[in-house]
Amino acid sequence: MTAPVLNSQSTYEAQAGFVAELATRLHAYGTTSQRLEGAILGVAHRLGLECEVWSNPTGIILSFADPVRGQQNGITRVLRLAPGDQNLGRLAATDAIAEDVLAGRMDPAAGLAALKALDRPASRFSQALNAFSFGLSAAAVAALLGAGWVDVATSGLIGIVIGVLYVLAAGRPRLSEALEAIAALVATLLAAAVATWIAPLSFKTVIISSLIVLMPGLMLTNAVSELSSQQLMSGTARFAGALMILMKLTFGTVAAMQVVGLLGWVPQEAVAQPLSPLAELAALLVAAYAFAVLFQASARDYPLVMAAVLLGYALTRVGGELLGLASDNFAGGAFFAGMGIAAISNAYGRWRNRPGALIRVPGIILLVPGSVGFRSLNFVMERDVWLGLDTAFVLLSALIALVAGLLFGNLIVPSRRNI
């Protein structure tokens, strides 16, 4: 396919500005480096631009060759950006704008204005719903981990407190930097107080469930995915960022336990209770709704995102239990689910001409092993180094199986424009 010839310098500058803004949006909405670079190169080619792009978790470099004077006289943009966060609603809107520009229904200048119009401050209702969804996800995960009703209620209440902290940190850079450590400290102290003075708890389960949204499981998965795609700098940087979050969470928990010891509290441990099938389904539905809110999907995509969460969990059970793929050395359920989710999300993207991330991201959220990494560092901090290393190997096994499944799924059904 021959790229179209640009007609004027103003057209070239407008197209370059649109592509640069598109790259910024994809980065801000949680797109990994290999997918972002592939998407931008594809859009630039369709617009007739000669473009080079380099992306990492905290920035983008874009270079556009001048259509008349060549690469040495082109436009270069160096963009310093904050790490992106999942926003499925705006990602879908960004994709729709790009489709309109590529189809000629909107010129690049209008596309640039439409992209910038996506920036809207969050309403108080959306902030409150976001904080409440922290509690819903915490309660649902506690139930899925086999906790009792007291554990579920405690996890949910602590999760709401963590959600309030998260919302407050959004506009406060200093609080944001220490959010994970403060959240772990608060969650551990509250759980210890309940287990000491009110009712016995499955203590570690409650702490992990309360902090589940802050666990960097998806970040770890994206990092390994980037490394497997030869995005070495991006993958290494993202992996280091995930480890730092785990360290802050671990430090907050360990510090809180020291305070508990100084206060003389003795948390009472409860015995975990397996869920009935009906209660498990209810917990899954609650978790699916909570993640639809936390991923900031648009209202019309809530059913799709919720179905993707349920599908990912079901495929894990099918692969691990019914097909017998799971073993002590291989997370077969995660591999099977990752492969299925990748293939289905890519097929959906091609069929509906929309981002496959609407299914891929929520579909793997209950598979990512963030809590395993948290437990591993906790064991090390408690000087049980061998158990910590053993748990770390479980983490790596789960990550490798999940990412391998995603890669195989992409081979079965290639993705649409990488997003």
Image (spheres, rainbow, N blue to C red):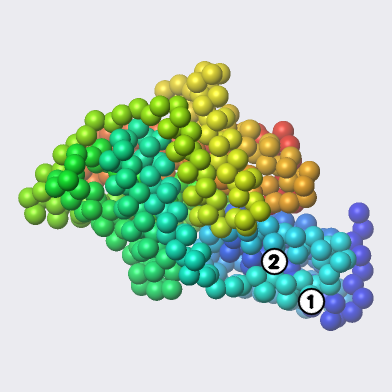
**Front position in the image: 4 or 194:** 194
Instruction: Find disc 2 in the rendering and name its residue.
Output: 22
Residue 373 appears left or right of 307: left
Element carrying mark 2: helix
| In the image, residue 328 above or below residue 161 | above
Residue 103 location in percent, x, y? 86, 61
Quarter of the picture holding the N terminus: bottom right
Q: Quadrant of residue 90?
A: bottom right
| In the image, residue 186 above or below residue 333 | below
Residue 191 appears left or right of 277: left
CA–CA distance in space, label 1 to label 2: 12 Å
Residue type at mark 1: give it.
Answer: Ala
Q: Residue at x 68, y 42 (%)?
A: 345
Residue 227 location in percent, x, y? 56, 47
**Front position in the image: 33 or 134:** 134
Instruction: Find disc 1 in the rendering and name its residue.
Output: 109
Residue type at mark 2: give it.
Answer: Leu
